[in-house]
């Protein structure tokens, strides 16, 4: 079976479409979810879509190694963000007994 030319080797457009889908799903999770952990997962999806863009443009664009280095830094920052955010979520859960964003109204005062 012979594949069409546009399926034979993935190009920049394929990576950009996958990245746009990841970004859209992450944004949807951030906007619609009330659970803090689901919001954090949406932020991670958004960061992963940015990483995919950096690596794709590094491969198909003028960025040779810079895109990969930026993606590595984004991964490091995402790991630090996840650790700090989960520590905050644990403290919120210990204090309020829930991770629902709308039920935690005492933080506004």
Image: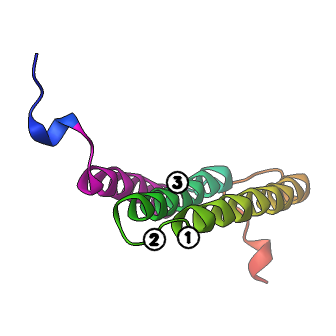
Q: Nearer the viewer, residue 101 or 81?
A: 81
Residue 49 percent coordinates (x, y): 46, 58
Mark yes or no: residue 58 visible: yes
Q: For label 2, count other residues whose C-alpha is less than 10 Å away and answer few (under 14), some (14-19) or many (20+).
A: some
Residue 45 percent coordinates (x, y): 52, 54
Q: Nearer the viewer, residue 14 or 66?
A: 66
State the residue position of label 2.
63
C-beta proximity under 8 Å, tags 1 and 2: yes
State the residue position of label 1.
66
Q: For label 3, count other residues whose C-alpha is less than 10 Å away and answer few (under 14), some (14-19) or many (20+).
A: many
Mark yes or no: residue 102 visible: no
* Element at label 2: loop
Nearer mark to the viewer, of 2 and 3: 2
Label at residue 45? 3
Residue interval drawn in magenta: 9-33
> Please, is residue 82 above or below residue 108 in the view?
above
Tell me what residue is drawn at x 27 percent, y 43 percent.
10
Tell me what residue is drawn at x 47 percent, y 64 percent.
54
Tell me what residue is drawn at x 39 percent, y 65 percent.
57
| Residue 94 drawn in magenta | no
* Element at label 1: helix
Describe residue 70's horizontal placement relative to residue 31 as left or right: right
Q: Nearer the viewer, residue 82 or 95?
A: 82
């Amino acid at each position: 079976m012979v594949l069409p030319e546009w399926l034979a080797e993935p190009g920049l457009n394929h990576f950009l479409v996958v990245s746009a889908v990841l970004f859209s799903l992450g944004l949807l999770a951030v906007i619609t979810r009330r659970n803090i952990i689901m919001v954090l997962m949406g932020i991670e999806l958004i960061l992963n879509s940015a990483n995919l863009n950096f690596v794709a443009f590094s491969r198909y664009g003028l960025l040779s190694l810079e895109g990969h280095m930026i993606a590595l830094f984004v991964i490091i920052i995402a790991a630090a963000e996840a650790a700090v955010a989960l520590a905050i979520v644990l403290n919120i859960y210990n204090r309020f007994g829930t991770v629902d964003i709308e039920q935690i109204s005492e933080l506004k005062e």
